[in-house]
Amino acid sequence: MSEEKLVKTSAAGRGSEWVALTQAEREAWDAFAAEHPQGNFMQSWTWGELKARGAWRPVRLALWRGGSIVAGASVLFRPLPGGRQIAYAPRGPLVDWNDAELVAVLFDHLRAECHRRRAILLKIDPAVPADNSAAKVALQRLGAVSVSTGHGFGGLQPQWVMRLDLTPDLETIFARFKPDWRNRIRRAGRKGVTVRVAETLADWHAFYDLLVLTGQRQGFTVRERRYFEELRELFVPSDQARLFLAEWEGKLLGGALCFLFGPQCWYVYGASSREERQRMPNYLLQWTAIRWAKERGCRVYDFRGVAPPQEKDSPLYGLNRFKAGFSPETVQWIGEYDLVLAPVLYRLWAGLLPRVQTWLRSRRGPRG
């Protein structure tokens, strides 16, 4: 993929520069995104590289002031028939939503860049709490369309998550777990369960095979094997991801794939076996991942998606019960919004998308 050329313009007369970043600004972007209050591994430079190995083209767009990035987004563009594109800023953009003028300037530029690339929409789902009134007002002024379902995970990224505060010491963190969870972690060790870091490609393949079986059992689809090989190639050397494997007498019982970016760690993929469940391997897996995140200086361990708390009959609610035992805080993000750039084509897209998604799911099966 060729490097993006710099595109600089003045921003509302405030001495700002709007830049499509090149590889030379990679460290500056990651430093900004990692420490931003809404920072997420999906806004990292490496995540864009991963998506570039598929159908997406990443463009990192930043607003500079006084030599520092103050707002921006890593935007993924995907071609559609007829020379059009869709644009998506996963867990973006990154901006201070309380600064109405900064938000307006940022979205003026984002809209212009997306128009220039012939996108019919820009989809966003920032990690902003649902009760952030400033963000809601800003999105309303922008004319953004809410497309969150309000059910299940709520969109491309989960709208409901659980987040564990890692700022206390490990002893305090452990003491806050529910008593049964502490006992199950200890029991896993007593019953011979061990947790190690996946070192080889064969380890990752074993995890993948177990993940596919887990998906078949629990009703979710799994990306192709090559996707996880690329995750390993891109994220593991820089210590941005780690795969933990729980075993008993050499038998794989579970796995947890976690991503680290700045002061946060995310538990993104989990696989579990039906065998030897009485040994509680998944409890020890999570405790091991939490300790790794704490050792890396993280302030938050994000368990990622759960069902809305009120949906106790949801098939996803078992995730709530398991994750809640570690005493995290349940957070509802603001949800998924579309900034419509081509109204007629957008209406066509919105009407066809559910049918296309159903058709794809029927064809791709458990390896999606």
Image (cartoon, grey):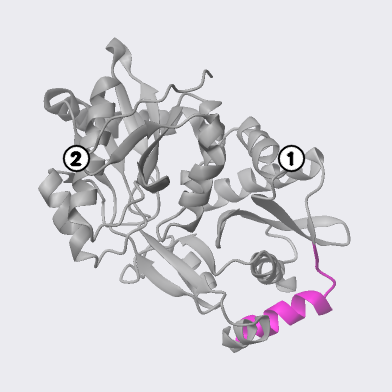
Q: Which residue is mark 1?
A: 205
- Residue at 17% across / 23% down in the picture? 345
Q: Nearer the viewer, residue 221 or 294?
A: 294
Q: Is residue 258 left or right of residue 313?
A: right
- Residue at 64% across / 30% down in the picture? 226
Q: Earlier in the sequence, mark 2 or mark 1?
A: 2
Q: Main SS of the magenta segment?
A: helix
Circles 2 and 1: CB atoms closer than 8 Å: no
Among the 4 quarters of the image, the one containing residue 86: top left
Q: Nearer the viewer, residue 6 or 329?
A: 6
Q: Which residue is mark 2?
A: 13
> Is 318 situated above or below 112?
below
Identify the residue at the far top of this view: 82
Image coordinates of residue 336 in percent, x first then y, are 28, 48
Is 308 magenta? The answer is no
> For the residues carrying marks 2 and 1, which lies nearer the camera in this image?
2
Q: Is residue 16 left or right of residue 222?
A: left
- Residue at 51% across / 22% down in the picture? 3
Query: For numbered disc 1, what is the local secondary structure?
Result: helix
Image coordinates of residue 61 in percent, x first then y, are 38, 35
Marker count (numbered): 2
Region rendered in magenta: 180-195
Query: For numbered disc 2, what is the local secondary structure?
Result: loop
> Is 117 situated above or below 366?
above
